[in-house]
Image (tube, rainbow, N blue to C red):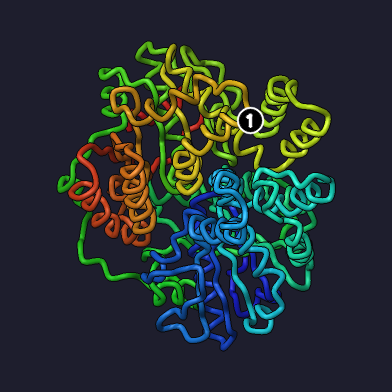
Amino acid sequence: MYQSFNPKINVETPFLFFTGKGGVGKTSVACATAVSLADQGKKVLLVSTDPASNLQDVFEMELRNDPVSVPSVDNLFALNIDPEESARIYREKTVGPYRGKLPDSVVATMEEQLSGACTVEIAAFDEFSHLLSDESILNTYDHVVFDTAPTGHTLRLLELPTAWNGFLEESTHGASCLGPLSGLGDKKRAYAEAVLSLSDQEKTTLVLVSRPDQSSLIEANRASSELRDIGIQNQMLIVNGLLQTYQPDDEVSTAFYMRQRNALKVMPDELKEVETFMLPYVSYSLTGVGNLRQWVSDDPLLESALNESSIDTEKIQLPKLNNIIDDFSSKGTRVIFTMGKGGVGKTSIASSIAVGLSEKGHKVHLSTTDPAANLGYMFHDDGTMKNLSISSIDPTEEVEKYKQEVLSTVGKEQNEEGLVYLKEDLESPCTEEIAMFQAFAEVVERSDDEIVVIDTAPTGHTLLLLDSTEAYHKEMSRSMVEVPTSVKKLLPRLRNPKETGVVIVTLAEATPVLEASRLQEDLGRAQIVPTWWVINQSLYATGTTDPVLKGRAVSEKQWIRKVNEELSHQYALIPWMHEEKIGYNNLKEMINA
């Protein structure tokens, strides 16, 4: 149906920019592309700008902010733009020159202004724009391959140059959320060059990665349209994980194959105009250089050796999703989060939990803080909801609401010059982070009257949001007459296991489990203890006999055991579904699957 993706033939530009909905396999595709190009003798730099990067899992090595050689692949170098480390360096570059020259109180104020999540994002973008605009990079490497964050985060990253350039051009008082002495003006040229590089069809190819399923194809289409609107025209689409054949006597195999083909048939018309390639669904894990080479070779479907003649689900018994719902209902949990790597099914799990609690007679509110949210898709045209209400936090609306709130309170106390300064400060992109945080706190506060279920953003964004709670509390203390009660109560509420339950969602695969394990550790440092783990979309639980699907199913066992024996005392297993569960009534079916 589609020609296979072959980096040797299909890659022409020096910059390759991979993007797509979380969990579609951007990292795997980017890594396989980089390995293939390097094997041709091209010198390649592979870069992750994702705060939840898993390059280190794919190559089974530690990465840092500086390029390091990838073992067993000549000519391949990789780096991970660690947002926290970039922010620390950026913060010190900004504040350092003023230590000992300005009063300690002024330096402390600067440090405080540079403590929020926005600084982390700006710092990561600073590194990103440097790679795009530095001529020495182009002179050193034949290709720079960017494994980027999930779609919503990527779009925000790409919009920052325009926002910052516009802000800096209009600012006359040096105001910004990074502080009046942050000196962003000298970044304007680098940002402009970064934008030019992204929109230059001779330099950059945007590679949209999608699974052959309806929701990720819709997301790919949205990303394609929005990126084209900001000047990135040279695009290609890779449909990742297309099952090549099926076993007619295997119900799971047939449903898996047909579900993928049906999704491709209803692909948005605009996306059909983008040049499209395919990578096959394979039985082996896409980690390790050998497997990556195999995947983009002329014989990607080489069968892995199966050491077991059948799949015995009796060896590992896990509770179902309804056990989680019963637990939260009986304990009176008021706030429930689903967390995990992008693409593991947090939205469907959050939606199912909300529906299950609603069916038990609880009043429930389901919301999302994910910039690539699709709750509307989950409940599209569904009029059967009983005790359930739904919302999403819209950045544009929240920013305008926050601006008006600040101007109507703090603004009244300013003289003319102070008011101009305040308005300029509110035009900076960092205002969105503060506004979104306040909205998040307001949604959580609804738990006083109803159970709140929150479908959160992918791992990195979630952690930045949670880790910056105290920083934003300070920010609001400065910019508002009175800090909202919802903000004051937020951290204690999140840390109270009697009020809050965290559900970590994963797949029974190496990268999602390892990423979820790191998330659990980070939550522990934030004094937040996960309540349940969910292993979603398990082929192991289906008993399939299809050779390719069975190969993947057998490989799941070690990761199910790892969750079972090492990571959690409470866990549930959800089998791969024959059809995507959309709508209130269909989600009820998923609860007892």
**Residue lying at 78% horizontally and 73% vertically, measured from the top left:** 202
Between 19 and 282, the residue placed more toward the observer is 19
Above or below residue 520? Residue 33 is below
Q: Residue furthest left?
A: 315
**Residue 209, horizontal then vertical, whole percent:** 59, 57
Above or below residue 4? Residue 150 is above
Q: Quadrant of the N terminus?
A: bottom right
Above or below residue 115? Residue 53 is below
Between 107 and 402, the residue placed more toward the observer is 107
**Residue 582, horizontal then vertical, whole percent:** 51, 31
Residue 410 is drawn in which quadrant?
top right
Q: Residue furthest bottom?
A: 41
Category of crowding for the residue at label 1, using alpha-carbon neighbours closer than 10 angstroms: few (below 14), some (14–19), many (at least 20): some
**Residue lying at 58% horizontally and 28% vertically, measured from the top left:** 392
**Residue lying at 60% horizontally and 35% vertically, measured from the top left:** 434
| Residue 116 in view, yes or no | no
**Residue lying at 50% horizontally and 16% vertically, measured from the top left:** 385
Q: Quadrant of the C terminus?
A: top left
**Residue 369, horizontal then vertical, whole percent:** 54, 34
**Residue 47 located left or right of residue 251:** right
Q: Which residue is mark 1?
A: 479
**Residue 309, horizontal then vertical, whole percent:** 20, 61
Residue 490 is drawn in which quadrant?
top left
**Residue 112 located left or right of residue 351:** right
Q: Secondary structure beneath disc 1? A: helix
Task: Specify the amino acid type for callout 1.
Answer: Ser
| Residue 204 in view, yes or no | yes
Between 250 and 186, the residue placed more toward the observer is 186
